[in-house]
Image: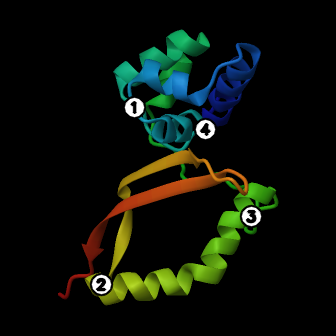
Amino acid sequence: MDRSVVTQKIIEAKVRNGMKWSDIAKAIGESKEWVTAGCLGQMTFTKVQAEAAGKLFDLTDEEMAWLQIVPYKGSLPTAVPTDPLIYRWYEIVSVYGTTIKELIHEEFGDGIMSAIDFSMDIQREPDPKGDRVQVVLSGKYLSYKTY
């Protein structure tokens, strides 16, 4: 067994039981964004979180243990994503990446935005021309050090 088997079992249970990520997140006690990433194999659960997931998805002790192991991050099967929604993110970074980099460096200096000390919020934004997807990413600024 490996983490991908647990991820597949979670997805199957979610579909079979008609669950929503927001409801799963409430049961686990974290944001829907973090819990979704965790259930998809990208985050490390605590014992308490793994046990909550275990109850929701009828996981074995071994499967709950896999949720607590630091995963290999990065879940895309190809270098350039083929899923249309994920590809749009790739496109956004391709088109606006240098702009984002330039503006962060201008505001903060030479450094990076953390994806570890990080939060994300995804919401529906009603719009008369068609609803919009609002995504807020917040990462701690980390300055490069001289040595």
Mark 4 / mark 1, whichever is N-terminal: 1
Q: Please tell me whether residue 33 is drawn above or below residue 1 in the rendered image.
A: below
Mark 2 / mark 3, whichever is N-terminal: 3
Judging from the image, what secondary structure is the residue with disc 2 in? helix
Residue 67 on image: x %, y %: 49, 29
Label 1–label 3 contact, CB within 8 A:
no
Residue 64 is left or right of residue 126, and the answer is: left
Residue carrying label 3: 87
**Residue visible at 55% across and 36% down?**
36
Residue 65 is left or right of residue 108, and the answer is: right
Residue carrying label 4: 40
CA–CA distance between discs 2 and 4?
A: 34 Å
Question: Can residue 110 be seen from the camera position used here?
Answer: no
Residue carrying label 2: 107
Callout 1, which amino acid?
Glu
Residue carrying label 1: 30
Foreground tag (2 vs 3): 2
**Residue visible at 46% across and 40% down?**
34
Q: Quadrant of the C terminus?
A: bottom left
Judging from the image, what secondary structure is the residue with disc 4 in? loop
Crowdedness near tag 2: few (<14), some (14–19) or many (≥20) residues, C-alpha within 10 Å = few
Q: Quadrant of residue 51?
A: top left
Q: Quadrant of residue 40?
A: top right
Pick the front one: 48 or 99 = 99
Mark 1 / mark 3, whichever is N-terminal: 1
Mark 2 / mark 4, whichever is N-terminal: 4
Q: Please tell me whether residue 30 is drawn above or below residue 89 in the rendered image.
A: above
Foreground tag (1 vs 2): 2
Q: Quadrant of residue 4?
A: top right
Residue 133 on image: x %, y %: 61, 53
Q: Residue furthest left?
A: 147
